Amino acid sequence: MSQLVSIVVNCYNGEKYLKKTLESIKAQKYKNWELIFWDNQSEDNSKKIFHSFKDTRFNYYCSEKHTTLYEARNLACQKCNGKFIAFLDCDDWWYDNFLSARKIFFEDEKYKFSYSNCFLYFEKSNKYVLHSKTFLPYGKIYDLLAKDYVVRISSTIIRKNSLKEINYFDPKFNIIGDFDAIMKFCKEGDAHAIQDPLLCVRIHGKNFLDVNRKMFFKEYKEWFLSQPNDKFFNKNKFLFLKKLIYLFLVSLFPKFLKDFFKKK
């Protein structure tokens, strides 16, 4: 019997791209899933678009107040009934084999989470670019992610117990909560990787990270300074410091980031 997968979509004013996101969930070949749609006090037509889908697996929840992204993610997780939780941002979309491709992960308890490659869709140029052009690491990957962080949250499926073990996402973050959680998982167990792209991540002018570079630097600095003095962090401290310096420069000179994406 197939395992129930809970799919969390956090939404705040996501009407522009939401229909495509929800259609990609409904089209999954793997049928044993539930959608936990968490509306973070949207002021647009997101609720109306959601309710246009007539599927008993679609579950709508509206936050009592507007919260940070990771507070919203944690609240949505409390509604999940599945052994596994997948997260899909409301401007991204999955291919129809996103869930069905995870058979090995579902059956092997040693894996804390599963992730895949993806396409980055640059909306302005209408261009698709493969996110990672190298082999995605699997198994014990903390050191490899410290060097090159290739995990996109919309590509992941996580064991619910793994999230419980780290007390879910750190609500103080607005941007790097995914990164923080994934790095914690990598200290505790193995990662499962799928080399094929199973989704598209949309890059557009209103991406939260693109317009909040200074916040990204501030949060990464806070993460860096709060890390425990353990073998994982100490071994890679110089790599994290280089990233911190890079983010500081990007926060002051945004052209650095544009040049970086051009090279991609």
Image (cartoon, rainbow, N blue to C red):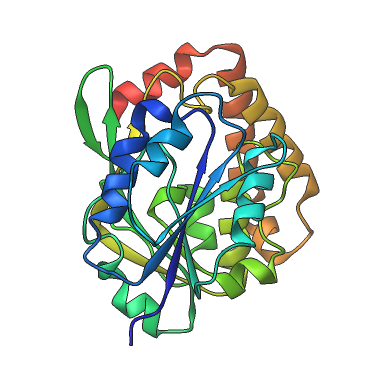
Quadrant, the C terminus: top left
Which quadrant of the figure has residue 116? Answer: bottom left
Evaluate whether residue 153 shows in this view. Answer: yes
- Measured as percent of width and height from the top left, residue 219 is found at 70, 35
**Residue found at x 58% / y 66%:** 185
Which quadrant of the figure has residue 49? Answer: top left
- Measured as percent of width and height from the top left, residue 87 is found at 46, 53
Closer to us: 204 or 46 = 46
Q: Horizontally, is 138 left or right of 99 in the view? A: right
Which quadrant of the figure has residue 81? Answer: bottom right
**Residue found at x 58% / y 22%:** 213
Q: Horizontally, is 88 left or right of 176 in the view? A: left
Closer to us: 73 or 126 = 73
| Above or below, comparing residue 43 to residue 173 in the picture | above
- Measured as percent of width and height from the top left, residue 125 is found at 22, 18
Quadrant, the N terminus: bottom left
| Above or below, comparing residue 225 to residue 160 in the picture | above
The residue lying furthest to the bottom in this view is 1
**Residue found at x 34% / y 72%:** 32
- Measured as percent of width and height from the top left, residue 23 is found at 27, 46
Closer to us: 28 or 140 = 28
State the count of labels.
Answer: 0
| Above or below, comparing residue 253 to residue 185 in the picture | above
**Residue found at x 20% / y 26%:** 127
Evaluate whether residue 199 shows in this view. Answer: no
| Above or below, comparing residue 168 to residue 197 in the picture | below
